[in-house]
Image (cartoon, rainbow, N blue to C red):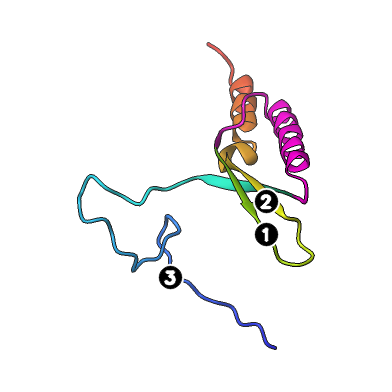
């Protein structure tokens, strides 16, 4: 079995260049700067508790509330896989620590 890379023709927003655009000018494919953070377990309560614990620690690290746009719950009933799949869709700038960098930069700017 050989693995071959699949090349995709994407635009700057990460969608296919040949994706049909919505017909009306008021409609659009939006850029969504959110990244899923995944928690998998056979017990839903445990997965949710771990996601909550991670969210608390990430917010403490960030120094402000983490921007979470959605919580996605799915399941995987294939053999050997954890059944529940909880995903927090988090702002990728928050995950990169951008607010920390902004605060650090602002603290270094001399005031007049």
Which residue corresponds to mark 1?
Answer: 76
Q: Nearer the viewer, residue 92 or 19?
A: 19
Asked whether, in this view, residue 95 is left or right of residue 8, the answer is: right
Asked whether, in this view, residue 29 is left or right of residue 99, the answer is: left
Q: Residue at x 28, y 59 (%)?
A: 21
Q: CA distance from mark 3 to mark 1?
A: 30 Å
For the N terminus, the quadrant is bottom right
Q: Nearer the viewer, residue 73 or 11?
A: 73
Please tell me whether mark 2 sits on a helix, a strand or a loop. Answer: strand
Query: Which range of residues does the magenta coloring cover?
Result: 41-69
- Report the mark closest to the observer, 3 or 1: 1
Q: Mark 1 or mark 2: name the one nearer the start of the chain.
A: 1
Where residue 99 sits in the image (x, y, percent)? 60, 30
Q: Main secondary structure of the magenta part?
A: helix
Q: CA distance from mark 3 to mark 2?
A: 30 Å
Where residue 58 sits in the image (x, y, percent)? 71, 33
Which residue corresponds to mark 2?
Answer: 85
**Mark 1–mark 2 CB contact (< 8 Å):** yes
Please tell me whether mark 1 sits on a helix, a strand or a loop. Answer: loop
Please tell me whether mark 3 sits on a helix, a strand or a loop. Answer: loop
Q: Nearer the viewer, residue 6 or 106?
A: 6
- Report the mark closest to the observer, 3 or 2: 2
Which residue corresponds to mark 3?
Answer: 9
User: Residue 27 lies in magenta, yes or no?
Assistant: no
Q: Residue at x 58, y 47 (%)?
A: 35
């Amino acid at each position: 079995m050989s693995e071959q890379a699949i090349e995709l023709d994407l635009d700057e927003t990460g969608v296919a260049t040949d994706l049909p655009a919505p017909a009306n000018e008021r409609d659009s494919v939006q850029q969504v700067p959110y990244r899923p953070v995944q928690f998998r377990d056979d017990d839903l309560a445990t997965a949710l508790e771990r996601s909550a614990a991670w969210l608390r620690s990430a917010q403490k690290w960030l120094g402000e509330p983490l921007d979470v746009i959605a919580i996605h719950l799915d399941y995987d009933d294939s053999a050997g896989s954890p059944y529940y799949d909880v995903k927090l869709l988090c702002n990728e700038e928050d995950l990169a620590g951008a607010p920390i960098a902004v605060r650090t930069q602002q603290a270094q700017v001399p005031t007049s």
